[in-house]
Amino acid sequence: MALLVLGAALLWIASRMVWLDVVAFNDQSGEVRRALTGSQWQPALVAVALGALAAVAAVALVRGTGARVVGAVIALLGLATGAVLFSAVGGVDSGRVHSTVTGEEEFGRTNAGPGSTDAQAIPEWSEITEISTRPAGPALTGAGAAALLAAGAVPMIWPARRVKRDDRYVTPAARRQDRGTGESAADTGTDLWQELDEGRDPTGDPGESGSRF
């Protein structure tokens, strides 16, 4: 579970870090610089981080085959994160960068035109002149993907076992029935005292009701 929480935390931090520094130029504002965070450049990071956090509860509650299924889902989240990382570092699409910095309101209005009072607006006719990447965000994403893959592999290989029935909360009649059906259950001192409390002779025939004291 610690690996799962670690992976979710790494992805969340990576989504808040700056991944790209962009320089755009237009005849209205001149040169304008923008920084794209991980969540702005790769929105899937936030979704995967939230999915990993939701899986924490499932890992704690599910046992047996269900735990293997949850582990498989977590591993798929790790693979999805790896795919997001590959698409991010495999090559930056300048067209996508242009549509991102001109299409998001927080970067600038897309309808900004000549005479606009917003000197920092990035209109659609701007030209992307420079794109530089920062390695910290992708590195944390890779570490998060590895953590999720490991967190998914653990329950798939060693799923949590089902909790055995606690005999302290089983009636003596149920214990006798278990022994009658061939289940192994050793007599304990607790059994004897419970039989005596119910007024039965623990040394007698289980089918006969003993005399009460």
Image (cartoon, rainbow, N blue to C red):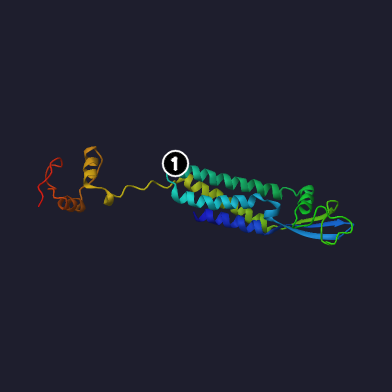
Mark 1, residue position: 65
Q: Position of residue 8 (x, y in %)?
A: 57, 54
Q: Residue at x 68, y 55 (%)?
A: 38
Q: Position of residue 120 (x, y in %)?
A: 82, 61
Q: Nearer the viewer, residue 40 or 11?
A: 40
Q: Residue at x 57, y 44 (%)?
A: 76
Q: Position of residue 117 (x, y in %)?
A: 85, 62
Tell me if residue 205 comes above or below residue 37 in the rendering. Answer: above
Q: Residue at x 49, y 42 (%)?
A: 69
Q: Position of residue 164 (x, y in %)?
A: 33, 47
* Occupied quadrant, residue 75: top right
Tell me if residue 183 comes above or below residue 39 in the rendering. Answer: above
Q: Nearer the viewer, residue 44 or 143?
A: 44
| Total numbered labels placed on residues in the image | 1
Q: Nearer the viewer, residue 4 or 113?
A: 113
208 sits to left or right of 155? left
Crowding at dot 1, Cα within 10 Å, few <14 / some 14-19 / many 20+, comes out as some
2 sits to left or right of 189? right
The local secondary structure at tag 1 comes to helix
**Amino acid type of the residue tagged 1 in the rendering:** Thr
173 sits to left or right of 153? left
